[in-house]
Image (cartoon, rainbow, N blue to C red):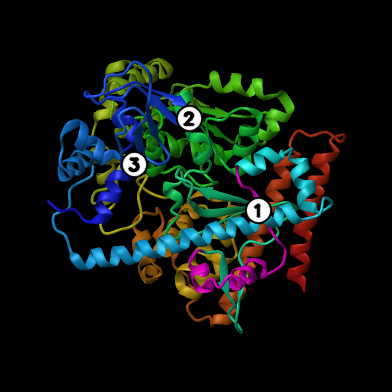
Amino acid sequence: MRFPPEFVDRVQEANNLVTIISQYTQLKHSGSGFMGRCPFPDHAEKTASFSVSESKQVYHCFGCKKSGNIFSFLRDYNGMSFPEAVEYLADKAGISLPEIQDPQKNEQYNEVQDKKKQMLKLNKMALHFFTETLKRVSTDHPIKSYIQRRKLTAETIEEFQIGFAPVEWEGLANHLHRQNISLNLAEEARLVKARKEGNGFFDIFRDRLMFPIVSASGEVLAFGGRIHDQGEPKYLNSPETLVFNKSKTLYGLAQTAKWIRSEDSVIIVEGYMDLVSLYQAGIKNLAASMGTALTAEHAKLIKRMTNNVVCLFDSDNAGQQAAERSLPLLLAAGLYPKGLILADAKDPDEFVNKFGVEALKQKIESSPELFNMVLQMWMRDYRGEASQKVKIMDQVRPVFDAIPDKRLKSLYAQELSYRMNVGLDWVRAALTAPLNRPEGSRVASEYSSGEGTQAVLKNSEIPARKPLISISGAPHAEILLLQLSLKSRANFEQVCSQQILSQISHLGIKTVFEKAEQVYRQDDSKFDRLTSLLIEYVDAPELMFSNSSDLDEEKEKKMISDCVKRIQQLFLKDQAKRIGQGINKNDTEKLQEIGELNKSRLSLNKTDKN
């Protein structure tokens, strides 16, 4: 059977050459790859001369000179034909074989691949521009002060290829133009944007410390920019492109994958600076989710390197919700997740500065299983009442549905029995009893059928991790912003350009925006279907519709701006309140930070009055 190129690529990406070869010979970490004795029977050797590169997914024996990729290894070692090797690897990854091959689709695939190559080349040029810009700025430049304040060394900056986007509106655009690079392609790569009025393009990233998002093979996929002064958003990330899918990408693996493999464990942090600062401090088996929720694809990516995961969460409500979301996803992938909340610091970097890296290592070493941590959250006010027991089992049930290992299910059931002070038989019965879901709820029936977090709802590009997304009880400004966004393509583009997502307080509204933007960025022709894709997966569909059908375009733009300002004001107020909890009047740094937040909030108020 002849397979389409896109299917072969998908199968190859879903498997790991190191895992395959490790079935036949012992591989040990060496430099940037692995070394072991040659597994081929016609090459008897006593010393290790067989090299495997995990980042490039190739092998080479310095003795017998055999080399190749995952398909050639299965051909030469197991005698498989190429189609047999593809089928074998597809089966290992749980990928269904295609029924037919369409030559026209192959031609389209080749065109897409050519554009991807051009985009990757363009991203590498942008990386060079950002790194060179950082080298050229003066020592008294604010970005250098920020780097010094964050204690980033020259070695770390070089290893992670950190750069700087200048404050000018057309710095990168002019540079690419001088290099005869198509700015239309640069716009597709989400590096520049065409002006709405007049000609020309302007840079998307300006006056930010730039972190390239690099694949394990060294390709520059996208960028993240961090502001070095007060302002929002703190992080500005590349939207999805032909070469970048954030739900399948973890930051830092180009530098950290070898450490994850050698430690047989990965520590998941939230953002670029968390990863870079911990790496510099000596904790190197890291990956960062870039401020987004972990996905099933992230879990599969982790599975290729290790089964052991420690997730570092913030101590606020968002951290608790992230723990709850991550638990079934990680368990569904067959991983063994642990969780850690750093209650004594706002992030890992602050914790290390306060207590030292050894203290953090000890906390990571003694971190509890994520299941137990989440269960403890759910049982915070547990008094043993019958209704509480039923509610907890309703929360636990989706987690159990996601676990493929029956042994782990059995042990977790015993843990529930002990903590809730109920019989093990009752726990087992509660976990297998029919779910009390509204009749006709397709979301509920698919989730309870055992597909759990891995289910992809039919006729929709939007994955469901929970039976319903709750948007009830969200602030009025956030609901109104969602309504206006889904009303027209122009409104949606306006909201996306505001970069307001990180400041939305209600998890359900934020989740709906994330999913809507993900579908739209992948194919903007699907805008008209967004509402229909989302509507049956929210708990209050009526809240998605606007009553302001008679407003003209200008009034809607004004309403969107007002909603954005209100959300920003509430966000700044909440940030100031959070920082102010438990501080004393001698803590000048935090008091100054609160003052800056309040000043920003007041400036928004003045803008409203004007």
Instruction: Report the residue at 27% width, 55% height from top.
Output: 6
Residue 215 pos. (x, y %): 47, 46
Q: Are marks 3 and 1 in contact (CB under 8 Å)?
A: no
- Work out whether residue 135 or residue 460 is closer to the camera in this orientation and state it: 135
Q: Are marks 3 and 2 in contact (CB under 8 Å)?
A: no
Q: Is residue 66 left or right of residue 305?
A: left
Query: Is 148 drawn above or below residue 381 in the view shown?
Result: below
Residue 564 visible in the snapshot: yes
For the residues labelled 3 and 1, the Cα–Cα distance comes to 40 Å
Residue 400 visible in the snapshot: no
175 inside magenta stretch: yes
Instruction: Report the residue at 34% width, 41% height from top.
Output: 453
- Work out whether residue 227 or residue 557 is closer to the camera in this orientation and state it: 227
Say which label, 3 or 1, has the lower sequence index.
1
Could you tell me which secondary element the residue under label 1 belongs to? helix
Q: Which residue is mark 2?
A: 260
For the residues labelled 3 and 2, the Cα–Cα distance comes to 25 Å
- Work out whether residue 565 or residue 62 is closer to the camera in this orientation and state it: 62
Q: Are marks 1 and 2 in contact (CB under 8 Å)?
A: no
Residue type marked 3: Thr
How packed mark 2 is, by other alpha carbons closer than 10 Å (few <14, some 14-19, many 20 or more), is many
Could you tell me which secondary element the residue under label 2 belongs to? helix
Magenta-colored span = 160-189
Q: Where, quadrant-wise, is the C terminus in this rendering?
A: bottom right
Q: Which residue is mark 1?
A: 131
Q: Is residue 261 left or right of residue 11?
A: right
Q: Which mark is residue 453?
A: 3
Q: Nearer the viewer, mark 3 or mark 1?
A: 1
